[in-house]
Amino acid sequence: MATLERMDWYDIARTTNWTPQYVPEDELFPAELSGHMDIPMDKWEIYDEPFKQTFPEYVKVQREKDAGAYSVKAALERSKLYENADPGWLSVLKAHYGAIARGEYAASGAEARMVRFAKAPGQRNMATLGMLDEIRHSQMQLFFPHEYVSKDRQFDWAHKALDTNEWAAIAARSMFDDMMMGRSAVEVGLMLTFAFETGFTNMQFLGLAADAAEAGDWTFSSLISSIQTDESRHAQIGGPLIGVLVANGKKAEAQRMVDSAVWRAWKLFSVLTGPTMDYYTPLEHRKQSFKEFMQEWIVAQFERSLLDLGLDKPWYWDIFMREIEDQHHGMHLGVWYWRQTAWWNPAAGVSTAERQWLEEKYPGWNKTWGACWDVITDNLVEGRKELAYPETLPVVCNMCQLPINTTPGAGWQVRDYPHEHDGRLYHFCSEPCRKIFQDEPQRYAGHQSIVDRFLSGEIQPMNLAGALQYMGLAPGESGDDAHNFKWADTIRDERLKKAS
Amino acid sequence: MAMFPLTANFEGDFVLQLVAVDTENTMDEVAQAAAHHSVGRRVARRPGCAMRVRRQGAEQAFPRKQKLADSGLKPMECVEIVWESEAR
């Protein structure tokens, strides 16, 4: 029997809105779950998804993608990647899996909210496929690291991280919950798919796949590429929504959602992706600095798509541009210094050659960030290793949940952005994190940061051992220098050679 | 006497840190407590310099012998610890 071409029936099959007779429309699409902002049903029906795929096509393509990724994994299982890879690369894998795998599963719930409560039929259609994508991503990113669990307990954090109170897990969970779990169908469309996925993860996955190939990790490269092709489809759910909102006088609401989500995504990127690109990836495998990557792939492309869709650049764009230069250096230094509280082993990335690269990519690095690393390096070279471990906690931001930090040394400009609400003093890392709180205090005021929990006595005993236990970091899981300080030994040798 | 947590921002360091001090501590003792977590760890020592404590954004430092209890600082308020040449 002859079948119709897809576009001969797609529009009809997708037109699934109807006039409810047994319940009022507001019960079928409650405002808090739908996020419709009283825009009438027929206005949502103009939503036209840019990427059209039918369910049979989806199943066929996904099956092929799965077969490809799993067969690469099977073929390379004996390649001894774990034994041969640079420890810095293994840290990239551990940080990625722990922060992302379970977040993908949560994302399937957010997509499901769009499937059920979006008033735009096209959005529901795309989100159905997106929901299935996210389940696949979670399953794959749990299955792939599982082969390493017997070799290295830190890989168990692919599954465990987001169930713990480890500080980076709290930060990731705080952002994902805000963007996905506690939002309406429209908010999820704008904040998760447009801001986070179009703005960041789609491009991030492209970069990560290339880095993996460069590092010789073909299994991870094919996995990430396979996921990225899904991202590039379902990330497009949000774009047409902006058109509907702008056309119906809701530009300010759309702008606020995008502004909030872009900023929160940026902060998480600065701690996960920035250190990975500029410090953990072995020098010979680095293609671009994080700043170059951000400017080329994220900033330029995202700025264009924002303007094309009728929105403005976020109000904090200048602050964002400044942070791209700097913020990830501080996140890296913080993770390395407090490395016992991470589930991966951060690579310091400050050998003599690496510092030259950093100075070249970030002029002035030596006088600022380098000044802190000078003291750390001297301590390690001169046998004062105990000073390379912390004895207190960094103060973290009550929005992004990350250490409040910025440029040290000669360019010292660290500061708190405080705010008092209902008698409680909150600390923020930046004007945008504070503004997001001030715009919706009822959403954020109840959350306790890791420092708040420490001060309230929730973490016992009130010392490092108590903190590690609270974070769920068992012996063998707690992080340390990825290269066991060999880089400092090399610097000591270089100094001795110079002196002789 | 009571434990009093502060947010410490040490000149030249990169991060705000939690410092536990006591309401009876002088500002010099507060500076020492903050220095313990920064100086010699990520901030180079500065022989011949004193450390002064000021409220974030203030131009004037607190008097060195002033007790924390008399400073008007709130728990977890951010203080800056800055270097000052002894000659001043």
Image: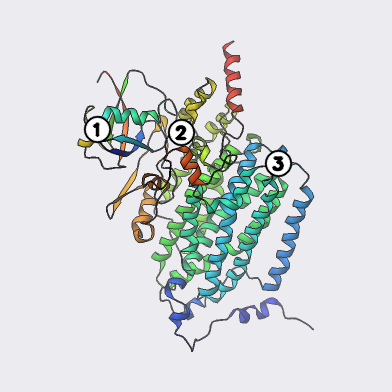
Q: Which quadrant does the C terminus of chain A fall into? A: top right
- Give the residue type that dot 2 points to: Pro
Task: Indicate the secondary structure of the residue bearing disc 2.
Answer: loop
Tag 3, which chain?
A
Q: Which of marks 2 and 1 is in front?
A: 1
How far apart are labels 3 and 1 at the CA level?
54 Å
- Give the residue type that dot 3 points to: Tyr
Residue of label 1: B24
Residue A154's image quarter?
top right
Tell me which label, 2 or 3, sits earlier in the chain. 3
Task: Indicate the secondary structure of the residue bearing disc 1.
Answer: loop
User: Residue A260: where, in percent of width, then height?
Assistant: 43, 57
User: Residue A81: where, in percent of width, then height?
Assistant: 72, 42
How far apart are labels 2 and 1 at the CA level?
25 Å
Q: Do the residues labelled 2 and 1 touch (CB within 8 Å)?
A: no
Residue B5's image quarter?
top left
Residue of label 2: A390
Same subunit, labels 2 and 3: the answer reads yes
Foreground residue, A162 or A322?
A162
Q: Do the residues labelled 3 and 1 touch (CB within 8 Å)?
A: no
Residue of label 3: A82
User: Residue A252: where, in percent of width, then height?
Assistant: 39, 64
